[in-house]
Amino acid sequence: MQYIGEHLLPGQLGHFFTLLSLIASLLATAVFYKASRVVSPIERKSWLRLGRIVFLVETISVFSVFALLYFIISHHYHEYFFAWNHSSRSLLPKYLLACIWEDQSGSFLLWSIWHCVLGWILIWRAKQWEAGTLTVISFAQFCIATMLIGMYFFGQKVGSDPFILWRQQMPELPLFADPHYLQLPRVFEGNDLNTLLQNYWMVIHPPILFLGFASTIVPFAFAYAGLRSSDHSWAGTALPWASFSGAILGTGIMMGAAWAYESLSFGGYWAWDPVENASLVPWITLVAGLHTNLVYNRTGYSLRSTYFFYIITFTLVLYSTFLTRSGILGDTSVHAFTGADMTLQLILFAAVFFIPAIILFFRRYKKIPSIRREESSYSREFWMFIGSMVLFLSALVIIARTSLPVFNKIFGSNIAAPEDPKYAHNQVQIFVCIIIGILTGTTQYFRYKDTPPPVFRRRIIWPVLVALLIGAMISLFGHIDYNEKTIAFLIAIHAAIFSMVYAVVANAGYIFTGLKGKLRLAGASVAHVGFGLALIGILISSSKKKVLSWNTTGIAFFKKSNTEDPAENITLFKSLPTDMGPYNVTYVSDTFNTAQRKRFYGIQFQAKDSSDSFTLYPDLIRNNKGVEGMSANPDSKHYWNKDIFVYISAAEKNDKEDTATFRPREIKAGDTSFYRNGFFVLNRVVVNPPDQRKRYVPGENAIFLDMTVVSKEGHSYPIMPGIAVKDMDIRSLPDSVKPEALAISFNKVIDQKTGRLEIGVKESSAITDLITLKVYEFPMINLLWIGVLIMVAGFLMSVISHLKKRSLTVA
Amino acid sequence: MKKIHIAILVLIAAAITALIGFTGDLTTYETIASAKQKPGRFVNLIARLDKSQPMQYDAVKDPNYLSFVAEDTLGNSVQVVYHNAKPQDMEKSERIVLKGRMQDGHFECKDILLKCPSKYKDDPKAVSRNAGVY
């Protein structure tokens, strides 16, 4: 069958380069491995040269694959399943890159690209470690390449080919019986990128995150090379790599948190979701390894633990990619990254790195130099090691709990998560927080090897006192009164806040007293200050997170406690100001933005006790790609000390035809009349009232009825129906009370002398637009974001100061 | 014993305590029948929305009260009460996971997870539906 309009060349080229990358990476692994084993420098040099050529071929292949995929998507060649499934012609160009990361193959490709970049930097800078580290990186490239080929070996499908034609992937679909299938509207248009992913976060978060993941291979590669050659001098070179990795991976993770906070309705920035945990855990072990690495560089202690931490960090990254991609998390995670069935391959990917490395570690264990004499308990290295152990155990607890679905799969059990999974993690991690805060602050004041106790005590006393003062002020005046759980947890929160304040004060103080203000040496202290601030932001914003949207209709205002769980949603009727605690809120508008497929709801806030007034625009976005319904995106208002955060939980738009009629009724001034849900009173009749001037024109005589409607729940609303008379024309000006589904018109004067009037009463529910909302307040949330930025800056300062030092010694 | 080793043992003991505490909090997946035998215990129910029974949610009266009937594959059913907004498009779900406890003959639900059809974008049926063919 000859199909019209297909462009087969890009796909064929793409497939060729994928295969080339597979072969080149395997070859590069072998060549670099040989280079690492030969002893003679001349032989080594020639092997290295060959390795670099092969690695260059590999790099060009990987970049070509990426370029061809982008070409196919941007030219809308929908004969390729990848292009059809993840993009559309109406997609804004800035989201074309996001289409690539929407798919698993795309994110593997991204990972592979970063490996190439890192590989070339290592070739440039790693000197005698080039052969060993590039062996590891090339092998990782080979593994990733197998994820992209999509071919069958012995009946098993290996990988998932991004260049496969749609008609090859699903040949049974009847639409391929038509040679002009490319012109069919849905095929021509494309299946589009998931609407939730059409935002700038999807363009920038995956690249940074995957650079973070990719960079953890470098310390692993150094560790492997060191074990293989029993030469441990790599530790000096590896340290800035570990710092860089910590900075980028940390940034990537927190970008995810910021995205969750800003765009998706997870109700916050962190939910201890399995995918979040799986990326955090390697970061924690990386930081642990970084600290033991530093200890080894300065004192010779902790080399074995450094090896161990660097090996498991990369392993945990591979484990995390297995958890995320294999679909094993299923219902336990809100992130739904399933699709190709690559479970076995993902497990093998992790195993093939972890098992040889850990076997090598245990075989060389005795030969790794370690100092027999124990560290002094007044030494920096002793407490840094304790800190790394605490971090490691914290990571272990998190990953053990997150791996519950894996446990279920292996043992065939059917255990579910606890009732409050977030609290389960928070309970433990708060104690980790307390310990780490104290350690971070105190350890800076110890010297390496030993510190005379009086010197130590003298230097530490000021940070302790200042921290106690600040901590006490926060505890006393900060209204930290989180009573949703036990009182013990509340005490732990206070202790954690003090501990982190201490970390900030002690580290900031150390920059001045210990480092004499030399900022360029202060990378570590700055990073610790940032970490402390971020944690203070987390503790305060989470423990003081307030729900503002208590439903005030009929229920007394009260806070969430561990015995009561009141409702978090409030219903707003269009144009009706509603009492919501400290604000009066009105649902003022809704507009549909066709291009973005979003309906924006204008919600106006008016503070009761000040002139503060603002409008927020949360939206509902129509889901695409066959998923029904709408997803809600929040909007938030940022103050320096808090954020107010609003999102729509339900919306009802009434466009129905109003078929009910006005039924006539007689009434006099002062009379009370009943309707379905209450009564109304005609207070008086007014003629040409100035405040209703908008409703009638000059030259008309307008008569209005000043009435009040009182519902049986006790709410009262004003209502003013009227008529405007000009010569013989009478215009009826009905008025309505939407929440009561009540409309009243003024029909005529029956008898002027007795004051009897006729009104029309209509009761129908087809006149209300309503939404239900959740409104949260997060105090001091900005501390979190500022803290993260400062922490990343601290990491990068360390990298720069290490590089400067090395170039000084080398030159 | 070296100080370091003592410290490590203490920390490991703390970690084990944390994990054991966690296992005590774990919950189970139950059928409606077995859940009814464990009133007050927090359980997870896998069930379906019984569309033949009325579902009660009135955002005007109370946006935080949803009541419906769930039935499972064994044919048992139970009245469910959920004190929160109705999840979007709950009527279109194929399966729901309910987390909560049995109380006074009905199920007090804390959380609802919806399982909607065609969640997997590589599913050929979903794809052909999207392609506007079937």
Image (tube, grey):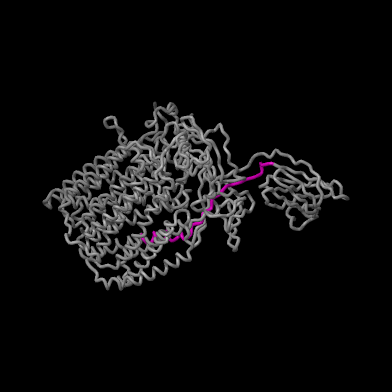
How many numbered markers are drawn?
0
What residue is rendered at 48% in x and 59% in y? A481
Residue A67 appears left or right of B87: left
Q: Which quadrant of the structure image shows residue A339?
A: top left
What residue is rendered at 36% in x and 39% in y? A328
Task: Give the vertical position of A372 relative to A182 (above or below).
Answer: below
Q: Which quadrant of the structure image shows residue A503?
A: bottom left
Q: Where is residue B16 in the image (x, y as percent from the top left)?
A: 31, 50
Tell me, yes or no, whether the highlighted magenta stretch contains residue A146: no
Residue A44 appears left or right of A141: left
Q: Which residue lies furthest to the left in this view?
A: A40
Residue B4 appears left or right of B27: left
Query: Residue A10, can we see it?
Result: no
Residue A771 appears left or right of A779: right
Q: Position of residue A348 (x, y in %)?
A: 27, 40
Q: Which residue lies furthest to the right in this view?
A: A753
Tell me, yes or no, whether the highlighted magenta stretch contains residue A782: yes
Query: Residue A796, can we see it?
Result: yes
Q: Where is residue B102 in the image (x, y as percent from the top left)?
A: 49, 40
The residue lying toward the viewer, choosing from A475 and A391, is A475
The residue lying toward the viewer, choosing from A723 and B91, is B91
The residue lying toward the viewer, choosing from A60 and B110, is B110
Task: Give the vertical position of A161 relative to A357 (above or below).
Answer: above
- Magenta residues, start to end: A764-791
Q: In the rendered view of the protein, which quadrant contains the N terminus of chain B?
A: bottom left
Q: Where is residue A538 in the image (x, y as percent from the top left)?
A: 42, 57
